[in-house]
Image (tube, rainbow, N blue to C red):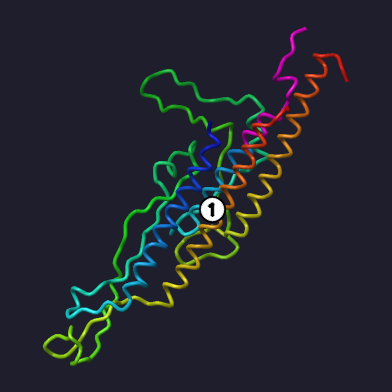
Amino acid sequence: MSSLNIFDIAGSGMNAQTVRLNLVASNIANANSVSSSAGDVYKSRQPVFGAELKNVIDAQNAASKVEIRGIVESKAPAVMEYAPNHPMADKDGYIFKPNVNSVEEMANMMSASRSYQNNIEVLNTAKQMMLQTLKMGQ
Amino acid sequence: MAISFNAALGNSPMMLALREKRGEILAANMANADTPNFKARDLDFSTALKQATTEQTLLAHTQAGHFAPEMPFLGARLKYRNPNQVSLDGNTVEEHIEQAKFAENSLQYQASLQFLGGKFNELRSALTGQV
């Protein structure tokens, strides 16, 4: 039944938003994980969403799901802080903090949860439509 | 005289199929609301219905080397939506608009469903001869 496509599509949207939400959680949880070198410090991670290409090209199957193309680490420089008494301080007395921007992450979280809710609404409506279709002519 | 289901049911099954397809497309738009460079699409319903209900002339496919003639689903061709506000990431999905269209579409789907159900009830009462 082709109408189950709606469930697949909304499901893919929810899946993508869940990954995004997971990454937000990871970023916020690690916002204060300090390190003694710029290379080792935790870097903010973001998902890259893309529309499933085979369906975009194929006009007959135009409704395309979301896929996660990958997860990228932010290239913003780590925050250096002078704290010579910190146990993780390097030989010059600096510690490195992750480049996580909490404000951005909170906004990201809200956006992700709204989009997730949106997909749930679509799913619910589609479910009701299908249930009514099953009851047709009775 | 045999009952022809196609004649008895009229446009309703086609309408349902098209509404369903449109719902799928709108769901995909909303699922991709955060996808960079995704362009929102929609079904031009009246032309889609017109094409779905009339005979279409398709290119003949007489040799293996020929391109397969394009067979759009129920004659439905998708168009890109013109966004009211453009966003920097090239995404043209506007969630409120998609939501409104989706709600509209599901209502229309239910309406088509009711009509189709009514047709079946009519057929049933014609068959049983009871009102």
- The reply, left or right, for residue A95 in relation to residue B22 is left
Count of picture labels: 1
What is the residue that sits farthest to the top in this orientation? B1
In the image, A108: left or right of A32?
A: right
A79 vs B53: above or below: below
Residue at horizontal 78 percent and vertical 24 percent from the top = B121
Q: Chain of mark 1?
A: A
Where does label 1 land, which residue?
A119
Q: Amino acid at mark 1?
A: Asn
Quadrant of residue B53 within the rendered picture: top right
Label 1 element class: helix
| Left or right of A134 on screen, residue B80 | left
**Residue B47 falls within the magenta-colored stretch:** no
The x, y position of residue B55, in whole percent, is 63, 24
Residue A127, quarter of the rendered image = top right
Residue A99 sits above or below residue A92 on the image? above
Q: Main secondary structure of the magenta part?
A: helix
* Image-based side of B109 in relation to A16, left or right: right
- The percent coordinates of residue B131 (x first, y second) are 88, 20
Counting from the top left corner in percent of width and height, residue B78 is at: 55, 43
A37, B82: nearer the viewer = A37
Q: Residue at position x 60%, y 63% from top?
A: B84
Image quadrant in which the C terminus of chain A is located? top right
Residue in the picture at 59% in, 47% down: A124
Q: Work out whether A45 lies above or below A17.
A: below
Which residue in the rendered view is the most extreme toward the right? Answer: B131
In this view of the protein, which residue sits in the foreground, B114 or B100? B114
Query: Range of the magenta residues?
Result: B1-18
Q: Position of residue A1 (x, y in %)?
A: 53, 31
Q: Pointer 1: residues within 10 angstroms few (<14), some, or many (20+)?
A: many
Q: Residue furthest left?
A: A91
